[in-house]
Image (cartoon, rainbow, N blue to C red):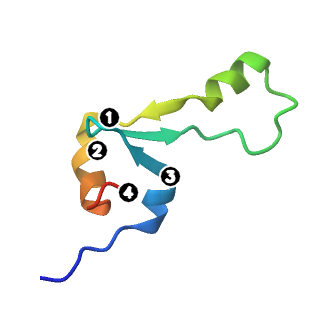
Amino acid sequence: MPKLKTKKGIKKRFRMTKTGKFKHGKAGKGHLLSSKSQKRKRKLKMLNVVDKSRNSMLRTMLPYGG
């Protein structure tokens, strides 16, 4: 059986924790930051945990954990 290919776009955007959950960065921190408050920018630094319903989809796209 051939090796499974990893989806490179997903690999760049998501990372897998040791418990099998997926985390990703938030959108909106690339530019136009001067109009955003410090609190908002601080919150944008944090990583979001992906909903459980999407975990199986991400596992198929990242067969080796990313």
Q: Residue furthest left?
A: 1
Distance CA(mark 3)–CA(mark 4) = 10 Å
Q: Are marks 1 and 2 in contact (CB under 8 Å)?
A: yes
Q: Which residue is mark 4?
A: 66
Residue 2, located in which quarter of the rendered image?
A: bottom left
Q: Position of residue 30 (x, y in %)?
A: 74, 45
Of callouts 4 and 2, which one flags the residue occurring earlier in the amino acid sequence?
2
Q: Position of residue 44 (x, y in %)?
A: 64, 30
Binning the other alpha carbons within 10 Å of mark 4 as few (below 14), some (14 to 19) or many (20 upward) gives some
Residue 60, located in which quarter of the rendered image?
A: bottom left
Q: Which residue is mark 2?
A: 54
- Between disc 3 and disc 4, the foreground one is 4
The kind of residue tagged 2 is Arg
The kind of residue tagged 3 is Arg
Residue at screen point 80% across, 44% down: 31
The kind of residue tagged 4 is Gly
